[in-house]
Image: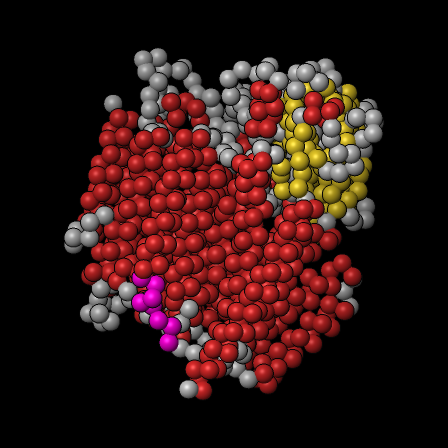
């Protein structure tokens, strides 16, 4: 009976979402009601998982009585239906947040904003109700036990990765709703940008965190020591991230200079469209991907239609209404506007190259029937040069002023960073010259900036510095780990020693073990540096009872400047195993940089000009 | 008036820069794309006509009993089948956790002169029920695989 109540709550939420689409002064109440009923529905699904109610098909497909409680809770978003429920729950959560925190907005604006969010909720709720009901029963005969959660998903990082990512994806719906509302009301000015920017920043922050956690998970769970694979599903989250990054920057120009308006609107629409496209790619399984867990063409078709409707309607609106947004500020070639324009252009181009690489196989197959895949070398060879250009401009933009900057002034600010970066890169070994040079260029020019303008800095500028510093750390991590890492796959017998970089590893012991829902072999591998003992690593090879899937558990000795990474491959004999022994210098910088970028976004939002004021002002 | 023309001049320069940037990006992209496309083949396709010496992908089922591992290093030999034809695959390295007999997998690498395949990567999907889409379709083509998937 209880699962039926969950579905009933879902339908009620759908009704409230429908009512929310009419901007008749009631959208606030309905958006909060929608959120309450979706929460109820979500809690009921959680309850079914916690209670092991295997009469619910979705529960039996993704859980098992032996599954630890923590993973039973997170198994709710381990499959398609539950992921979507979490997705709409978050959408309505953002809606409710806008309803409560947006009270300072002019009444009509607030109404339209919420009704646009209502339309999006209707679309997704209809999708769930029609194609992906998580509460479906397998009555009259319920299975005795479940089929267990995919072992790859039984991991702490995977508990938070999907929610963070969805928060980001879905969060851009608010930026999108702001853009549509601007088109409908014909108003977009610096005040408007001040309303929209914190919402955009926080969505972008979540997306950043989601991607960072996903990358970290891939690093230690997939057991190949990679942190980014240019997999279609990764790209699906990276594309809106790139455009979201452009949007955050262009909103700064709207706010400060009252220009770039139409462009900003277009960016907001495009960013959210890419979020929808990402959902389509993940959920339809049209692309070959390690993430293609569940796929169903019918579901893909629905999202594709929804995506076309959303994009078509918003672009149509754009065509008829964009002329109302006048850009009335001029700027010099040498000005922060120009540098931010370059930033936007480069980020959009970067996004386009990822887009082409990701979707090209799909189009080619559609038109010629040829099956191809685009390999990671494509992405690296296109992406790296673009990023180098971006990194160079990242030194210029913060040092320049809005409206106009003299070349002399730029030179004055940047001569020290340029000389230092060049000097530093020249004393580095050839492979890492560029990495160190670019990293130093960004960091030193940021420090110079903070030093000369220390007294006037606002929170949002500190946020920017923090995020840019994060980019520099990230770039150092990527460049240094790629150039200096040592990856060895070796054949090892008990007692054998192998070396990777300055470290030596000895296979000291192999022991069997038993977990709650798996059996395992645990190896003890001693690591030495110059004959000095460093640590013992315990990689495992688990075999899960229900699915009989083998799964490597990596063991890592982490460090700020290097990771020692060990994973068991296959058992090749009584005491012989294939073993991955990796030495990864500076790899932590990658995720540290990502976290700093997210932190920067958070600091920016704390700026006092984004504090919520009373509605009476600015109408 | 001055600001008007200046504004237009600025715009013109920006637009030219944008077009140049876009053109070079498109050029780079297409070039890189051309270099990095990996065509997909089935074992039967390979026997008919497949390019040698360039990176291609091949998909099929691992033939039971065909997996032979070395006793002193990580080299392994196995056969892939589309149920009609088999191709021998040579690989050195660690096979994925989900590699097993009768499992649908995809290998990336180069076709050798003796019609054997030298793999640089072996991919198995992270789901025991999941069959790479290309493999399912190629098996359907040889009519040995029903409508199960």
Q: Quadrant of the C terminus of chain A?
A: bottom left
- Return the residue nearer the eye: B14 or A430: B14
Residue A261 seen in render: yes
* Colour scheme: secondary structure
Residue A219 located within the stretch drawn in magenta: no
Residue at the (65%, 79%) spot, across then down = A416
In this rendering, would A344 be left or right of A575?
A: left
Left or right: where does residue A426 sit relative to residue A537? right
Residue sitting farthest toward the top: A141
Q: Up-down: is A511 above or below A599?
A: above
Left or right position of B124 against A101: right
Say which residue appears at 26% left-offset and 68% top-offset.
A613
Task: Let me know if residue B96 appears in the view.
Answer: no
Q: Is residue A87 above or below residue A510?
A: below
Q: Residue at x 43, y 24 (%)?
A: A61
The location of residue B80, given as percent across then percent down, is 70, 22
Q: Residue furthest front?
A: A368
Quadrant assignment, res A253:
bottom left
The magenta stretch is A321-328
Which of the pair B47/A153 is nearer the observer? B47
Q: Determine whether, in the image, residue A464 is placed left or right of residue A570.
A: left
Q: Residue A57 in the image: x percent, y percent?
A: 38, 22
A540 relative to A57, above or below? below
Q: Quadrant of residue A191?
A: bottom left
Q: Position of residue A181 (x, y in %)?
A: 29, 58
Q: Residue at x 45, y 49 (%)?
A: A274
* Quadrant where the image shows the N terminus of chain A: top left
Q: Residue A492 in the image: state x and y as whole percent.
A: 78, 31
């Amino acid at each position: 009976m209880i699962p039926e109540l969950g579905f009933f709550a879902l339908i009620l939420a759908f009704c409230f979402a429908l009512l929310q689409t009419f901007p008749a002064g009631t959208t606030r109440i309905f958006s909060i009601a929608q959120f309450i009923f979706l929460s109820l529905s979500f809690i009921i699904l959680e309850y079914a998982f916690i209670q092991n109610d295997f009469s619910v098909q979705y529960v039996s497909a993704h859980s098992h009585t032996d599954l630890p409680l923590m993973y039973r809770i997170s198994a709710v978003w381990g499959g398609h239906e539950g992921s979507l429920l979490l997705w709409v729950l978050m959408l309505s959560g953002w809606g409710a947040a806008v309803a409560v925190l947006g009270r300072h907005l002019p009444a009509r604006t607030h109404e339209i904003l919420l009704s646009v969010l209502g339309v999006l909720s209707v679309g997704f709720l209809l999708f769930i109700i029609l194609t992906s009901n998580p509460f479906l029963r397998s009555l009259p005969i319920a299975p005795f036990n479940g089929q267990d959660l995919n072992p790859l998903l039984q991991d702490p990082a995977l508990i938070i990765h999907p929610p963070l990512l969805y928060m980001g994806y879905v969060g851009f719906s608010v930026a999108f709703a702001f853009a549509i509302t601007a088109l409908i009301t014909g108003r977009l000015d610096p005040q408007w940008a001040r309303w929209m920017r914190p919402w955009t920043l926080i969505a972008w922050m979540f997306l950043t965190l989601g991607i960072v956690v996903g990358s970290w998970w891939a690093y230690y769970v997939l057991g190949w020591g990679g942190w980014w694979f240019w997999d279609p599903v990764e790209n699906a989250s990276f594309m809106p991230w790139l455009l979201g990054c452009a949007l955050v920057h262009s909103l700064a120009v709207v706010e400060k200079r009252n220009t770039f308006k139409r462009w900003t609107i277009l960016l907001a629409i495009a960013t959210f469209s890419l979020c929808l496209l990402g959902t389509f790619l993940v959920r339809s399984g049209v692309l070959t991907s390690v993430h293609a867990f569940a796929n169903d063409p019918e579901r893909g078709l629905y999202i594709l239609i929804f995506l076309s409707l959303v994009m078509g309607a918003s672009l149509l609106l754009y065509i008829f209404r964009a002329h109302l947004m006048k850009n009335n500020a001029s700027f010099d070639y040498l000005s922060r506007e120009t540098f931010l324009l370059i930033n936007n252009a480069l980020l959009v181009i970067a996004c386009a190259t990822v887009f082409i690489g990701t979707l090209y196989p799909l189009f080619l197959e559609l038109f010629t029937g040829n099956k191809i895949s685009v390999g990671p070398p494509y992405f690296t060879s296109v992406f790296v040069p673009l990023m180098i250009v971006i990194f160079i401009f990242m030194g210029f933009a913060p040092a320049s002023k809005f409206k106009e900057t003299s070349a002399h002034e730029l030179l004055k600010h940047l001569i020290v960073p340029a000389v230092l970066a060049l000097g530093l890169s020249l004393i580095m070994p050839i492979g890492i010259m560029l990495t160190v040079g670019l990293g130093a260029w960004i960091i030193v020019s940021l420090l110079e900036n903070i030093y000369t303008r220390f007294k006037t800095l606002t929170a949002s500028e500190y946020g920017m510095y923090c995020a840019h510093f994060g980019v520099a750390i990230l770039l150092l991590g990527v460049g240094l780990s790629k150039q200096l890492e040592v990856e060895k796959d070796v054949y090892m017998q008990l007692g054998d020693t192998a070396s990777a970089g300055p470290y030596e590893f000895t296979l000291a012991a192999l022991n069997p073990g038993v977990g709650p829902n798996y059996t395992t072999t645990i190896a003890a591998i001693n690591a030495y540096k110059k004959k000095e003992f460093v640590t013992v690593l315990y990689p495992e090879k688990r075999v899960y009872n229900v699915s009989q899937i083998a799964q490597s558990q990596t063991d890592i000795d982490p460090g700020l400047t290097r990771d020692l990474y060990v994973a068991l491959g296959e058992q090749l004999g009584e005491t012989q195993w294939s073993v991955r022994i990796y030495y990864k210098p500076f790899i932590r910088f990658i995720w540290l940089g990502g976290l700093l970028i997210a932190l920067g976004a958070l600091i920016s939002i704390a700026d006092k000009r984004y504090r919520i004021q009373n509605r009476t002002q600015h109408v | 008036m001055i600001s008007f023309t200046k504004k237009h001049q600025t715009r013109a320069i920006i637009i030219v820069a944008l077009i140049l940037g876009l053109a070079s990006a498109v050029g780079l992209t297409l070039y890189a794309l051309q270099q990095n496309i990996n065509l997909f083949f089935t074992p039967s396709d390979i026997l008919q006509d497949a390019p040698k010496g360039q990176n291609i992908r091949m998909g099929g089922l691992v033939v039971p009993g065909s997996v032979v591992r070395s006793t002193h290093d990580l080299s392994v030999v196995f056969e892939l089948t589309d149920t009609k034809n088999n191709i021998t695959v040579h690989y050195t390295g660690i096979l994925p956790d989900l590699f097993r007999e009768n499992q649908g997998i995809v290998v990336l690498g180069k076709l050798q002169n003796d019609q054997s395949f030298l793999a640089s990567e072996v991919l198995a999907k992270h789901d025991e029920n999941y069959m790479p889409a290309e493999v399912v379709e190629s098996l359907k083509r040889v009519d040995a695989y029903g409508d199960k998937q």
